[in-house]
Amino acid sequence: MILTDYYRLVRLQEYAQNKTPRFDCIASTGEYPKFEEMAARSKVKRFYCYYNGIPDSFSNRARQKAERAITSTKNISSVFIPNINKPLFGFGDVKGTQDAILFVFSADYNLMEIFIARGYKHQQRALYNAMVKGELSAEIYKIRQMAINLTRY
């Protein structure tokens, strides 16, 4: 299996007034070290991130090509959305790792799904293309089934 970790995040009503959209984890496989460390350090004891514009600290390449970014106190990933006909699908890599990250958004952008492919940083575009073509549908279904709902939100 290529996809190793899964996080389902939503915009909670209690943070709806935030200028920058905040997404809180409501279900996950709970095994991605970087996200689990962030969750352990947070006040709410769950992984959350902000979906926002491109920070100045990003590389020139990322600022020129990325549509958005996910951040917490620090950058997590650029979000690249290369297909205008598929604006709800994106990709990137987890900063400081060799891991690819795939994104799926709901039409109203109140739900974000994150799929991690450990060790696939250099194949992130190929993984994105496979996802858009439906070639990862079985893996996506399987890893969603493995997720544990978090009752602490």
Image (cartoon, helix red, strand yellow):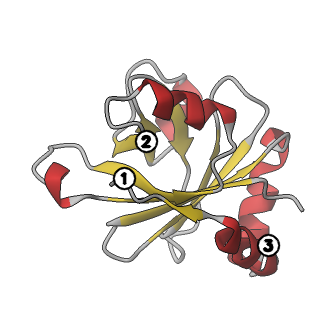
Which is more N-terminal, label 2 or label 1?
2
Q: Quadrant of residue 135?
A: bottom right
Position of 63 with respect to 35 (left or right) is left
Dot 3: within a 10 Å radius of its alpha carbon, few (fewer than 14), some, or many (20 or more) residues?
A: some
Which is more N-terminal, label 2 or label 3?
2
Q: Quadrant of the C terminus?
A: bottom left
Nearest the viewer among 90 and 13 is 13
Residues at marks 3 and 1 touching, judged by CB atoms closer than 8 Å: no
Residue type at numbered disc 2? Arg
Q: Position of residue 67 (x, y in %)?
A: 45, 48
Location of mark 1 (residue) = 152
Location of mark 3 (residue) = 139
Q: Quadrant of the N terminus?
A: bottom right
Q: Position of residue 104 (x, y in %)?
A: 54, 66
Q: Callout 1: helix, strand or loop?
A: loop
* Alpha carbons under labels 3 and 2: distance apart: 24 Å
> Which residue is situated farthest in the front direction here?
151
Q: Callout 2: helix, strand or loop?
A: loop
Q: Say which residue appears at 78% left-offset and 40% top-offset.
A: 121
Dot 1: within a 10 Å radius of its alpha carbon, few (fewer than 14), some, or many (20 or more) residues?
A: few
> Which residue is situated farthest in the top direction here?
57
Foreground label between 3 and 2: 2
Q: Say which residue appears at 58% left-offset and 35% top-offset.
A: 36
Location of mark 2 (residue) = 46
* Alpha carbons under labels 3 and 1: distance apart: 27 Å
The disc placed on residue 132 is none
Residue type at numbered disc 1? Arg
Residue type at numbered disc 3? Glu
Nearest the viewer among 49 and 61 is 49
